[in-house]
Image (spheres, rainbow, N blue to C red):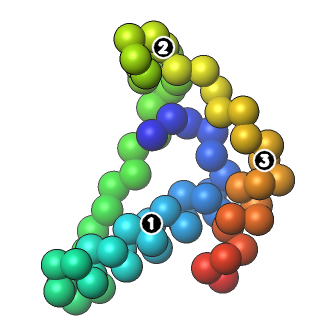
Amino acid sequence: MSQGRPPEVVLVLIKSLTDVVETTLQVRRQDVHLVVFEGPFRNIGEAGVPMEPPRIPHWHYRQVGTRFD
């Protein structure tokens, strides 16, 4: 995942992935461990070209982060 997302967005990702793993694999929540690795855009490619920073405004990320509070 590329760098630059607010901590609230990463929290939503972790909570959502944990929910999916818990339900799909029928494991205890405390047994789910995730590592979120954020790399610089210059090290990530899409369709053979380096990625650019996301164009989604930061206010959108803040709205997403409030869904799981």
Q: Residue at x 63, y 39 (%)?
A: 4
Direction from residue 7 to residue 23 in the image, left or right? left
Residue 64, image x and y in percent? 68, 65
Residue at (27%, 68%) from the top-left corner? 33
Q: Secondary structure at mark 3?
A: helix
Dot 2 or dot 3, earlier in sequence: 2
Please name the amino acid that badge 1 sits on. Ile
Please tell me the numbered disc located at residue 50.
Answer: 2
Q: Nearer the viewer, residue 20 or 65?
A: 20
Label 3: few (<14), some or many (≥20) within 10 Å? few
Residue 48 sits above or below residue 55 on the image = above
Asked which quadrant contains residue 68, the reply is bottom right
Residue receiving disc 1 = 14
Indicate the amino acid at tag 2: Pro
Q: Which residue reaches farthest front?
A: 47
Q: Nearer the viewer, residue 4 or 25?
A: 25
Q: Amino acid at mark 3?
A: His
Q: Earlier in the sequence, mark 3 or mark 1?
A: 1
